[in-house]
Amino acid sequence: MTRSVHPALIVLAGLVFIFLVGPLIIVVGAALSNTTYLTFPPQGLSLRWFSKIFEIEAFRRTMVTSLQLALLSTALALLVGIPAAYALNRFRIQLPGWLSTLFVLPVLVPELVLGFSLLRSIAVDLDAPIFLSLVIGHTLLVLPYVVRVISASLASFDFSIEEAAISLGSPPLKSFFTIVLPNVRSGVIAAFILCFITSINDVSISIFLTGPGISTLPIQILAHVEQFFDPTIASVSVLLMALTVGVMAIVERTLGLTFLTK
Amino acid sequence: MTVALTIDNISAQYGQTKVLENLSLDIAPGELVSLLGASGCGKTTTLRLIAGFLQPTAGRILLGGADLTRLPAHARNIGLVFQNYALFPHLSVADNVGFGLKQRGITPDLRKKRVAAMLERVGLEAFGERLPAALSGGQKQRVALARALVIEPPLLMFDEPLSNLDAKLRVDMRVEIRQLQRANGTTSVYVTHDQEEAFSISDRVAIMHQGRIMQLDTPETLYRRPANAFVARFVGFENLIPMQVRSRAGSSVVAEGPGGVQLTLSQDSYGKIPDSFVLACRAEGLSVSTDTNIEGIPATLGLRTYLGRAYQYQAQTPAGPLIAHGALSSPIEPGTAARLVPEPEQCTILAPE
């Protein structure tokens, strides 16, 4: 069976596709350029700007910091967010309605304000170490995603399934891990990826909380752009994309990305 | 009688709302008792208290003589069958059934054997490797039943297990449940809002209303001799007529109802009649007669509906609107004056409210 598709639809879909993919192609192209300045299309192909990144110590260091930060804050947010989402859904009737809204509030506050208030409170007043402040800030930043995404998964979960497990002799905590968690796995993976990407790309909170000796990759990129206009930036960006895609690939291999098709 | 399950004076509340008040119930070994009532009557709350998902504010629950009241739900060893099956979606049918055995530390070999035997008993031996999503509603309910039975619990509880199935399957499944329960001799509590289901499957039925048991009896007794007006209405005694005894002669009693209605009733068929009572009659227990010279409740017939086995009439009487049945052979036009005659087989005597 063939279906006729309106030509305008094809053109429109093509334009949207270009709009989405175009910038990525330009960045990748610019990163491969042999010139000493950012340009597209690339003139001459070279990987020299990629090797340049690793020659700049600040890039190496911040890349590691960003990775650690993203993994740690994501893990913390999952650790706090999954039980919170569970409780919010399991006891929805008994809990006041505003409680679930509370977990979304950090999204409503402009990130710059959140960053500044964190600087004022934990970094200055409590004199917390820079990396710890960053972890706290990023955990706060990504926590709403965990609660929302896991809540969405749990909303369709029938809690009598958990009761069935308990009635069959499985203690509540064990039932949570063997019965509830496997059934919201897709939500957990989605939350993980969202959090990781949000954290590793974050500028507005990090810019307040980074300090002497410790910075994140996006902040380093920002600092670099202020001084240089060479393709290093493009190649770092490509590397950042590759890193994110790499993490998603690992997640997909180990846990499966079935949630994308569900 | 020996008792398997004792519910001793339990009360429960959600927040400030009292759901159960001083409810007591004894169930004999191997007996199937239904909790029957409309939603909000406390039947599901009772089940959840026994299962351990809720804590009573007062009272005790004993199973086989042991006090369960403070025992956590997972340590109670009670088999549960849920309305929406509650199968583990990520586990195969065999793993669903084997879940309880695994919790009990049964070795994989023995587990496999017992799961296979159980699946065979519910006719699903070929479905062990499937996921629940690939099963029909009836098959899912069989898996749920197998999963609850395989742990050989001393008590099996059903929470509206058939209400998600279509009518035909519902009847088949309830026979199957009853046969399995009988064969295993498992003491069972069955929660439902469906009267026919409760009556057909149970040894005894507890009719519940507003957190109390209105009557606990065999289906036959409930159907023929309800203890009070609530149960009478519940089991289909549509006509309740309050009456006073005016005179007694031998076993015969003359009683008077509202609007001066006079009836002669025989204690031989109704049992002992107190001075003040309520005459409860099913629609088929009031037969319509156009002979206005006989004794009966004077009535003006209203709307006539065809029921297949009889005509049903809405009748206006001095005792208020009543529902009566008339023979198929002679349909009567609305507006006709008639007498409604109580048939003792389909009527009973209640204490006044």
Image: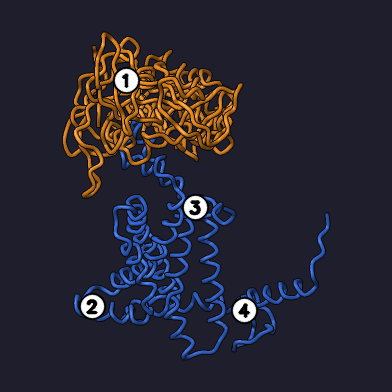
Chain colours: A blue, B orange
Mark 3 on the same chain as mark 1 = no
Callout 1 amino acid: Asp
Q: Which residue is mark 3?
A: A186
Question: Tag 2 or tag 4, which sits nearer the N-term?
Answer: 4
Mark 3 on the same chain as mark 4 = yes
Residues at marks 1 and 2, CA–CA distance in whole angstroms: 69 Å
Question: Tag 4 or tag 3, which sits nearer the N-term?
Answer: 4
Mark 3 on the same chain as mark 2 = yes
Q: Residue at x 22, y 80 (%)?
A: A124
Chain for numbered disc 2: A
Disc 3 to disc 4: CB gap under 8 Å: no
Residues at marks 4 and 1, CA–CA distance in whole angstroms: 77 Å
Callout 2 amino acid: Ser
Residues at marks 3 and 2, CA–CA distance in whole angstroms: 36 Å
Q: Which residue is mark 4?
A: A23
Residues at marks 3 and 4, CA–CA distance in whole angstroms: 29 Å
Q: Nearer the viewer, residue B288 or A49?
A: B288
Q: Nearer the viewer, residue B255 or B44?
A: B255
Mark 4 on the same chain as mark 2 = yes
Q: Which residue is mark 2?
A: A121
Question: Tag 2 or tag 3, which sits nearer the N-term?
Answer: 2
Callout 3 amino acid: Ser
